[in-house]
Amino acid sequence: MSGHPGNPEPLTPRAKLAVTAGKAAAAVSRAAGRGSGSVIGGRVALKLDPDLLGRLAQHLDVVLVSATNGKTTTTRLIAEALRASGPVVSNALGANMPAGITSALAGGSDARYGVIEVDEKYLAGVARDTTPKAIALLNLSRDQLDRAAETRMLAEKWREGLNGSKAVVIANADDPLIVWAASSSPNVVWVAVGQEWKDDAWSCPSCGGVLQRPGDDWFCGECGFRRPAPSWALSGDHVLDPHGSAWPIRLQLPGRANKANAATSAAVAAVFGVPPQVALERMYQVQAVAGRYDVVSFQNRQLRLLLAKNPAGWLETFSLIDQPPTPVILSVNARGADGTDTSWLWDVDYGRLAGHPIMVIGDRRLDLAVRLEVAGVDFRVCETIDEAVAMAPPGQIELIANYTAFQDVRRRVGN
């Protein structure tokens, strides 16, 4: 699509009709109590005009964000940073497939920037349609084993899809799969933000050999594929920019993973001319992201809501929770949006929860109960969130749930 950021070409009559019909469908869905309506609205709009996503993006400076973990939060942080230099349209609630993205952009005719979270499977297609100025690639690890391709295959798809892309790719130098995927791009900004979960990154994505991982470095002794030298880096509570200046990260979001998200977001903002100091100051405004990290009051108790969807996400989340004897409620479902395969539970080190009083809820509470029993951790199985909260010993409760279980909890506690 041609078109110039800030100078929208008028939409065709067909595109206008598609936008109107999509908004009407979304409104009907909301009125029926079926959620935000963004997905159904986008589907209706794309049926009427299959090229609508490209048309809606043509006047925007677009950044795409994709990863297994952290993409919703990073999208939010980048959007906040870019608002320093103009209006932003973003799919902030995480509807990250083409229909949801189309729906979000349909509401952004006055925006200058489009900050778009994209499901990993759809990245290459959305990049083709929206001609992004920047693409942020954070991490790749196992997730939704019944739906998603094996991680090496996903990295290969990204590599093919990004080959020759004009976008500036901002990529995590510490994740070998991300480096492999991004290396086909002519213009990459490498950011060192660490890699806590390494179990999907022991073999070389280039040749299949065993990766050597001395300290923070990594390389393949067989084919020479290795960690690139980063130009941006997370260092404790600071972001180091390409000139070696250290900028303090002050966030209301907890944990090291969010500092990593902020470091990547600062590197993305710089591509759009927003300096690190301004970008990082703006990120402080973000208190919660689609309910994540919110502390809510329920049955006279305080609950902190934490989302963890896959082994890498659970590992990061365990590092956030307060020390024992803080009570913890765990909730796991296996509906379509979660992936119906729960075998990933065996990849999570639940032994890290030893000493916490644990209550287990959710559709797959018995799968989780078996896993905890094998890990030698004490727990109680409960039917509902109400029962789990009533059983929890005093103190703020940490609640960790996967995707649809998290939405169930939010609805019940009125968040």
Image (cartoon, helix red, strand yellow):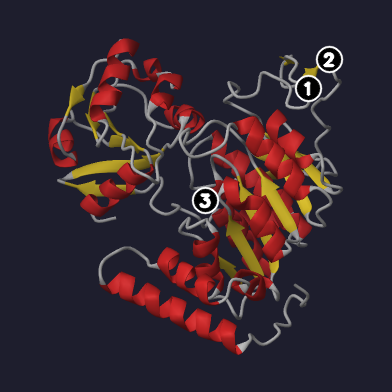
- Which one is closest to the eye, mark 1 or mark 3? 1
**Amino acid type at image mark 2:** Glu
Residue 135 position within the rendered picture, expressed as x and y whole percent measured from the top left: 71, 52
Query: At x 49% / y 45%, what residue is drawn?
Result: 253
- The residue beneath circle 2 is 222
Query: At x 34% / y 45%, what residue is drawn?
Result: 404
- The residue beneath circle 3 is 72
- Which one is closest to the eye, mark 2 or mark 3? 2
Q: Quadrant of residue 227?
A: top right
Q: Element type at marker 3?
A: helix
**Camera-side residue of 249 and 12:** 12
Looking at the figure, which quarter contains the C terminus? bottom left
- Which one is closest to the eye, mark 1 or mark 2? 1
Mark 1 or 3, nearer chain start: 3
Asked if residue 328 lies left or right of residue 319, the reply is left
The answer to whether the residues at label 1 and label 2 have Cβ atoms under 8 Å apart is yes
Badge 2 crowding class, 10 Å Cα cut-off, few under 14, some 14 to 19, many 20 or more, is: some
Q: Element type at marker 1?
A: loop
Asked if residue 131 lies left or right of residue 374, the reply is right
**Amino acid type at image mark 1:** Cys
Residue 192 position within the rendered picture, expressed as x and y whole percent measured from the top left: 72, 35
Question: Residues under labels 2 and 3: Cα distance?
Answer: 36 Å
Query: At x 83% / y 14%, what residue is drawn?
Result: 221
Question: Residues under labels 1 and 2: Cα distance?
Answer: 8 Å
**Camera-side residue of 136 and 249:** 136
Q: Which mark is residue 207?
A: 1
Q: Residue 403: in sight, yes or no?
A: yes
Looking at the figure, which quarter contains the N terminus? bottom right
